[in-house]
Amino acid sequence: VRHHPQDGPILTICTALEIEARAVRRSLPNARILVMGMGGRRLSREMNSVAGPVVVAGFCGALDPELASGDVIVATEVRGPTGTTPCPAAPLLVAALRSVGVHATTGPIVTAGHIVDGEEREALAATGAIGVDMESADVAELAAGHPFAAVRVVVDSPRRGLFRPSLLTDGLRALRVLHTVAEALDAWSAALGDREVVLAGPRSFCAGVERAIEIVERALERNGPPVYVRKQIVHNAHVVRRLEQLGAVFVDELDEVPTGATVVFSAHGVSPQVRADANRRQLDIIDATCPLVAKVHAEARRFAGRGDTVVLIGHSGHEEVEGTLGEAPDNTRLVGTVADVERLEVADPDRVSYVMQTTLAVDEAADVVAALRERFPRVAGPSSDDICYATTNRQDAVRAVITDADLLLVVGSTNSSNSMRLVEIAERAGLAAYLVDDASRINPEWLAGRRMIALTAGASAPQDLVDEVVAALGGLGRVRVSEHWVATETLSFTLPKEVV
Ligand code: SF4
């Protein structure tokens, strides 16, 4: 599918060689292809008339020894003798490449005015650059003020230098890869253009997530690695990866933790059974359960203790729900929908109470509570809503920012319940919405023709990932950013005594 509107910006593709130009031309019929010559000999003459987005595409040498011929590099920045040009839209190019089956490696590309090998290659690798070419930095300079990207297919590497018998076959393979790269460039270029971004506020970390992350960081500081964490400390892939790099070891079950080691319970809470198992195995427990989840556990215990059937409104299989169910497994019934309430069987309809998962959709939970009241008029509930302040605020903020938007992007991981609910709010309002772990998961096709983007992040997603998305959109054209706040959050929770 080609998306290019006739009035859209014209993309210029710069290649060094005619053979590279031929590999990309067929997939990019609307682009202007400039063959600039090796080292950009014809560059300044040809680029005089460029007044739009520019991409350098073609072959390069790898500096990273892990890269082999045929691998694809997308530049996060290009470095030349007179300076460095950032390439903020690189993550979106990575996403476009992924959608045509190409895995790209991202990193700096350095431009040398000649072919490099041997010691010079090693010296450039030591600077952190992963690829070397002869033109990108010069093109970037001439394209200043316009969206710019550089994508290169490796032909030679530290392990396989340029002058080798297999160069011809490897070169042909690299050409085929370059042809596929051009398909991705076509999808990526459809997303080019100026945009407005409206940030929902509040967004990103809540007090319970901040506390849980700080607990693991402090445990690592005090005890040194490894610190074991049962389940993901919060449901975010980036947070988990960062803590793993610091020495946290995430396990699914306690039998993976050596006897006597320190174990952190995640923000979602655990059942009393898990707590008892940890004690039996003489583990040092540090409990990062969010106090607002602990409050729901206490309610469930209180209701069950007085002989009620406890109806837990929540999503089956979610870790928080498993923990709460474990407080009174024999007396608790899990419901997720109004239909579940209609099927519910209880011992005594006059002795029913309910509690909730903290991250439900506010309006859907209200429907389920209304159905419970209808069936069990004497049903008792918590004194205040179990859906936490952070969930409520983020949902209100999304409702406020989607009114004029063409698209909602939610930064968060797929196992994050509160993030999923934010996507659903937009979908119920008839707006396209996507949950993305980071900017490299935004399919550029979603952006084609969409100028007003609403942006938020779930309670477990770091703000810097939101900044990365804004920067990536800014790599496609000018971006005007505004924020719409519906509440101010000042809540913070004290840390457990084991880490203070
Ligand atoms: S989303 Fe709510 S319940 Fe969950 S950790 Fe954050 S504040 Fe606590």
Image (cartoon, rainbow, N blue to C red):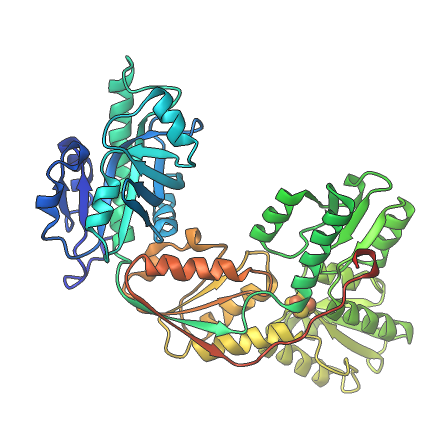
User: Where's residue 63, x and y in %?
Assistant: 38, 29
Task: Give the residue displayed 40% in from the left and 42% down from the top.
Answer: 106
The answer to which image quadrant residue 359 occupies is bottom right
Residue furthest to the bottom: 377
User: Where's residue 312, x and y in %?
Assistant: 74, 70
Residue furthest to the front: 82
Q: Give the quarter the ligand 1 occupies.
A: bottom right
Q: Left or right? Give the position of 247 relative to 325.
A: left
Task: Give the residue displayed 79% in from the left and 48% down from the top.
Answer: 263
Q: Left or right? Give the position of 54 relative to 400.
A: left
Q: Where 494 falls versus 373 (above or below)? A: above
Q: Which residue is at the front of the view, 354 or 96? A: 96
Task: Give the residue displayed 89% in from the left and 53% down from the top.
Answer: 276
Q: Where 453 falls versus 49 (above or below)? A: below
Task: Give the residue displayed 29% in from the left and 14% down from the top.
Answer: 164
User: Where's residue 76, x and y in %?
Assistant: 37, 46
Q: Which residue is at the front of the view, 275 or 302? A: 275
Q: Left or right? Give the position of 381 relative to 406.
A: right
Q: Which residue is at the front of the view, 25 or 194? A: 194
- Can you see residue 438? yes
Query: How many marks overall?
Result: 0
User: Where's residue 303, x and y in %?
Assistant: 85, 75
Q: Where 356 falls versus 109 (above or below)? A: below
Residue furthest to the top: 165
In which quadrant will I find the C terminus? bottom right
Q: Left or right? Give the position of 301 relative to 366.
A: right
- Can you see residue 314? no
